Amino acid sequence: MLRNRRTAGWAAVAATASIVIAACGSGSSGGGTPSGGGDNNSTGGVFSKISANQSGTPKTGGVLKLAGAGDADYYDPNIVYSSTGQSAARLYARTLYAYNPELGHTTEAVPDLATADPEVSADGKTVTVTIRDGAKWNTSPPRQVTAADEIRGLEMTCNPTSRQFGGQPDFNFLIKGYIPFCNAFAKAPATVSGIKNFLKTAKFPGVTVGDTPQTVVFHLTQPAGYFKSMLTMTAFTPRAEEMLNYLPGTPEQVAHQVSDGPYMIKSWDPTKSLDFVRNPAWDAATDPIRKAYVNEVKITEGEQQDAIQQQIQAGSINADWDLSPSATQQNQLIAQNDPNFNIEGSISNNPYIIFNTQSPNNNGALKNVAVRQAIATAINRDFLIQDAGGPKLSPPLTHVLPQGIDGAPADTNYPFAFDQAKAKQMLAAAGVKNLKLTFLYRAVSSTSQKMFEDVQNQLSKVGIKVKGLNAPGQFTIYTKYLQVPDTARQGAWDLSLAGWGPDWYGNAALSFFKPLFDGRELPPNSSDYGLYNNDKLNGLIDQAAQAQDEDQSNALWAQADKIVIDDVAIYPITNPNWGLLHSSATHNTIYVPAFQSFDFANIWVE
């Protein structure tokens, strides 16, 4: 997940999905107890300091004011994949299952639109979900959300435009007929009429309407105990038929977004502001997830980290939208024991350095594993962790999977320990010299800026020149570069920063390896930004995804982890703690790991 699954966050301490582009959540198996107490699911970092400010009697009304650097990747629930975008979708789009809003249970998947847990057939391949009566779209007149809407939403995740759901590899093999359906959809004209005409005749056997219009039946290719948790993903958001009148992910779509949540989009001025107001069609009695205390959610964009913090502390805004305080400021807030500061584990790999394994630059040097290993040996992880606030805020991570995800390696030894003399020898042995690399980063994040400068300095000492390429704003790095494979193939960048969190928790290794490292699928319908491909790894992913024995599955994921690290597809840095600040007038500030932010649908303000 970005911070922003499906593709992750690293804007502040390691802020943004993601990106923790993505992070969706699941059951209690994702948890453990943090060493500092608090939310029993916050296992990612060294400690957890909760400041949920739950005192007082909740008040209805008022305006929740947020500020941030920029927009989410999309305001289209079926293609949004960043954690910031998912936190916004919580306001206006409901899923069959959602993350529990209660402190201490925020990685648990609980019914949202669904009336209860799924009904699963004896062979585990048929999953039936019933949608609640009274859950309605804000159409004129309001209309019941149906199984047909659910099917339409999943179909549109792989629409023929370049705007698709980046987490498709999580489930495309699992839902019967999804891959051939998407392959056929890709050939349809990327126009409103082309999409409508295709959907009129296309056959998609993977999801059908059951014995009532509100009964959804999923037909799976294999049993999947994590499927309920997977249904928290925004890809499974129902889509009103009226939304077919607009291309997904466009300003026209946002302006006409049909809502079934407590809020609806009133206005959006890209990179400047986003405003949500109450949805009159929403009935609180049908929604067990969202209290929707405030009347309006106003988001100001284009702000800087320090300015946001000053506004929060002055009380002119309630909380940040997508930028945490800087690492320096977070350490000061910890030292001051600020009562309005939350810091909790993220259960993520965020950020990490991506290697463009298909870069044509330097005669294709980065295609050579030995060259990537030499570069990894020349980088000092400790320096990068200091850039992110030090090990208390950003404990080191040396593998793909963070603790809190089943199959995470117990061994923390990194095979390419920092040794610049050895790195020079490795480069010479690989037959390369005078490497010139382009590092793609986001100057809007102080942490990103510092890490680029640190890598530039460290690699200069082994004879590698590194120049920076700044992607302005929060998500340009994804929408203009990382999600466009041709930019990698053409050598626009050689190294970059990204981050990742799971699309669910516990038994969720699949949501790391399939989207990030399965070379059989590329962006925009995956997040393999470095175009990495290893046939042996692809086979292990298939075996682990199909394994029904937990121990066998975990052992296979551990093998997969070793292959990725040995191949230096990425250079992991940290599984950070995540710091968020709120004003003293802001209450019920419950941190949701999947969003890497507060649950804005349940905050109340004085």
Image (cartoon, rainbow, N blue to C red):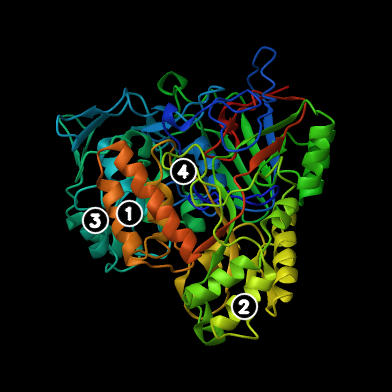
Front-most of residues 33 and 149: 33
Three-letter amino acid code of the residue under disc 2: Gln
Dot 3 and dot 2 residues touching (CB under 8 Å): no
Going 65% across and 68% down the picture, which residue do you hit? 378
Picture layout, residue 277 above or below residue 417: above
Q: CA distance from mark 4 to mark 2?
A: 32 Å
Look at the image and tell me in which quarter the C terminus lies: top right
The residue that disc 4 covers is 408
Front-most of residues 150 and 598: 598
Q: Tell me the SS state at disc 4.
A: loop
Going 47% across and 62% down the picture, which residue do you hit? 566
Q: CA distance from mark 1 to mark 2?
A: 34 Å
Q: Is residue 576 visible?
A: yes
The residue that disc 2 covers is 425
Mark carried by residue 199? 3
Q: CA distance from mark 1 to mark 4?
A: 15 Å
Q: Earlier in the sequence, mark 4 or mark 3?
A: 3
Three-letter amino acid code of the residue under disc 3: Leu
Dot 4 and dot 2 residues touching (CB under 8 Å): no
Q: Earlier in the sequence, mark 1 or mark 3?
A: 3
